Amino acid sequence: MYNNFCSRHVGSVGDTRESMIKELGYDRIVDLIEDAVPANIRGGAPLELPDALSETGALDRLRGIMGENKVLKSFIGQGYSGTIVPPVIQRNILENPGWYTAYTPYQAEIAQGRLEALLNFQTLISDLTGLDVAGASLLDEGTAAAEAMALAKSGNRKGTTMFVADSCHPQTIDVVKTRAEPLGIQIEVGDWKSFDPAACEGLFAVLVQYPDTLGTIEDYSEFVEKAHAAGALAIVAADLLALTVLRAPGEFGADICVGNSQRFGVPFGFGGPHAAFMSCTDKLKRKMPGRLIGVSVDAQGKPGYRLALQTREQHIRRDKATSNICTAQVLLAVMASMYAVYHGPDGLKRIANKANTCARILAASLTQGGFELVSDQFFDTITIKVPAKADEYLAAAVELGYNLRRVDADHVSIACDETFTCEDGKSLLQVFGIEKADSELADGPNWNEVHNRESDFCTAPVFNLYHSETEMLRYVARLEKKDLALNESMIALGSCTMKLNATAEMMPLSWPEVGNIHPFAPDDQTVGYRAMLDELSDWLARITGFAAVSLQPNAGSQGEYAGLLAIRRYHMANGDEERNICIIPTSAHGTNPASAVMVGFKVVPVACDEAGNIDVTDLKAKAEKYADNLGALMITYPSTHGVYEETIVEICEAIHANGGQVYMDGANMNAQVGLTSPGQIGADVCHLNLHKTFCIPHGGGGPGVGPIGVAEQLVPYLPGHQMMENEADPVCSAAYGSASINTISWMYIAMMGADGLTEATKMAILNANYVAKRLDDSFPVLYTGNKGLVAHECIIDLRPVSDASGITVEDVAKRLMDYGYHSPTMSWPVGGTLMIEPTESESKAELDKFCDAMISIRDEIQAVIDGRSDKEDNVLKNAPHTAEMVISDSWTHSYGREQAAYPMPAQRDHKFWPAVGRIDNVHGDRNLVCSCAGMEAYSE
Ligand SMILES: *Cc1c(COP(=O)(O)O)cnc(C)c1O
């Protein structure tokens, strides 16, 4: 026990662990667990998983499995291109816990580093696409196109049809179709050249690809005009690198532009994760899905970044939201933005020109060799006509170590990229049995002048300052140091499970056989990948007690979507089209109602009683009332209130009795693993957040993986993909979603084994109850189960002291920064409270330090109540205190500088300084600035 991985993953072992158990009044942890977890859900069949491996043992085994992959150079294109991850970015961001263990930047003052990087991302996207506003990443190109469809639709309630050019990437068309169907949107796929927008009734949007999927650069300006004239919006899916040299979509009238930033220094990873992007016109920005970074000022008038327009998001808008997106792709957006910072506009153009030059040489040689191309208007991708010979050329290419794209039996595409070398050129000529063209390339571009990019991009200083490695290294480090991540202190965010992301779990991500596999590589090259994913699916099926698991959804929200879609398809297949009601407790996460609506369900809320439990009488009454139309119940377990509801089994039965299916939101799976399971409890489908329970780091707000497990009857309705045997329409672009990061969860389970995973759950429960007990005198714990215990998290109630003191929960969250902590989840699911989830990975010492901080803050609040501190000018209202504030020659506050900055003795040894003072959100939303270009207004 003492030197296995589990003993490193959990924070407390041995005597310390025993002392905590005693502290809670128990002799053994099993007694605590028996009291905490209701008997009617405990004790199913034991988890059957392989024995735990050591770190080296698991790495060796995974090497063996992934060694079955064949790593060829892929010039397949189709939305994914080879790229060189600048080593300075690989080591200092991708492999650096200071970046990858950070949480979503809700606490802006201690997230200025990644917020700046994301603002750079937005600037890059907005500049390249020529549109006013860009968001801070979406999940992938296919879902981004689907989100664009929803955005366009939300402004045109009467519209029912979207036209999609058949020259879009096939996977994008498939995802858009999936998302359109439940919303009653007709997707018309066809040739844009012959499509007449004016003749299409109910047309609300058109979607085209630029350059198109075969590489052709088209002039869409007239088509866009016609679409506008017909009252439709124009959505352009674009290639980011091409935009460095081609006319920006905004300049030929696009209203929305989407795409993938993968080729800006993010490995293929067999499909993901990568950051997709969306930009739009100013008119649409208030409805744009996903997160948007904006600039504002702090309490001292200094500029600072923060998340803007949050009232758009599903957290607030719930079933009125147009998108369910929550976790996005922050780490990958950061990487892509840093790639642009590192290369600058000229460097990016150089890379683009290189890819174009390689394609031009190939094109000239092929033409000279007697081949015909689909078009001479290409950027980096050429499509060759090879009647009935595609397979032959493909095989010859594989023989020499290359993957090309098989468009169909008669066409092959070659997509050149940053990695293309002279050797590659020679080999490819050999594949086609031709010589290099003897003519020199003509001066100037190979495309018509109208396609030229005339406008500048990335003119902001940040893209032009850090092109040496030393400068780049320091820029990355400077931003990292502004952010509080898990390498600084515990981040006890309820519902978000910020546990250890072990180094051994992260290491495989840097292996070529993990990173360098194209999502559309042939099956015989991905044997290892699919074996790893199959094994992980099998383990997760055992852990959840389900028949099958799909790893395709690339975030929790997407898992919700895929799971509800399976339920919908199941009802439809049974002839129950009218089962369109989804019951959702009012305490549910905002993604739940947002997802339900996207799948075509009508949301019926049920309330909770004062004890925080779902009102079972109300729920049963509603299930019966809607018996003819009941489609599903969405329920989180343990509840979002951090309690194991005793009635869960009864609730599932009531739903089934009335013809509905039970969707369990598995965000709280960390309180179930090894002790019970959604399958055992009676759920039919459940999503997991591998970026919560199964150790994928949060990356500062993504990536994630949101697999779903389903019971037998729903297996036929899991999402499929053109690359899979199951060809049902997919929920995202790649067959296995964010495939590469599944290695992290694979490593975790392999190193923990059944006993380790169960121990982790027990320790998570022990830690939460320990914190609850230590804090109860200062801040009462709001909800507990029958025996006065909580599950793996606890909600502490600040409302009574807030009322007495005027100190808000936000003041406490900001004051925690002065103590070196990130706030627990604020005011969700209950306003005026904090939800604390310590996870199993935190040690007793860290829990005690955090509790000491909270208790000390309670004393600070008491001082306000007692009149010993000023009601306005106090350490809480003025928090956080920056070094600049404390060091300043003028100090006018009614309390001392030491109290402001060093409230705990240990901080004299090490102190984390917030980079800015309290940020003014209202000011930022009123004066919306979402790119570096607008920063001047703030920097006088
Ligand atoms: C995190 C969370 C989600 C959403 O997951 P994402 O991966 O962020 O999309 C849904 N429900 C609950 C209860 C959660 O905590």
Image (tube, grey):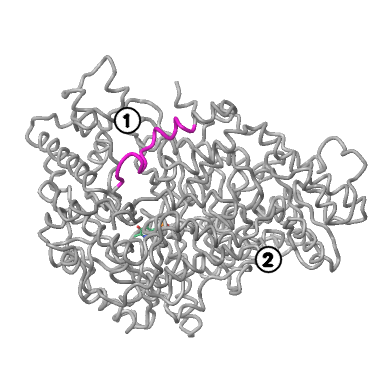
Displayed quadrant of residue 823:
top left
Q: Quadrant of the C terminus?
A: top left
Residue at 73 percent across and 59 percent down: it is: 405
Q: Is residue 240 left or right of residue 873?
A: right
Which label number is shown at residue 189? 2
Q: Position of residue 873 (x, y in %)?
A: 19, 28
Q: Is residue 21 left or right of residue 587?
A: left
**Dot 1 crowding, Cα within 10 Å, few <14, some 14–19, many 20+:** many
Give ligand 1's quarter of the image.
bottom left
Give the residue at mark 1.
913
Residue at 13 percent across and 66 percent down: it is: 787
Residue at 12 percent across and 54 percent down: it is: 23
User: Taken as a whole, is the magenta stretch helix, strand or loop?
Assistant: loop
Q: Is residue 259 left or right of residue 865?
A: right
Along the viewing direction, whichever of 223 and 290 lies nearer the viewer: 290
Give above or below for 132 relative to 269. above
Residue 478 magenta-highlighted: yes
For the residue with label 1, is its CB less than 8 Å from the closest atom of ligand 1?
no
Along the viewing direction, whichever of 764 and 316 lies nearer the viewer: 764
Q: Position of residue 852 (x, y in %)?
A: 17, 41
Seen as rendered, the residue at the extreme left is: 866
Helix, strand or loop at mark 2? strand
**Residue type at mark 1?**
Trp
Which label number is shown at residue 267? none
Report the mark closest to the observer, 1 or 2. Answer: 1
Q: Which residues are magenta?
A: 476-491
Q: Quadrant of the N terminus?
A: bottom left
Along the viewing direction, whichever of 503 and 601 lies nearer the viewer: 503
**Dot 2 crowding, Cα within 10 Å, few <14, some 14–19, many 20+:** some
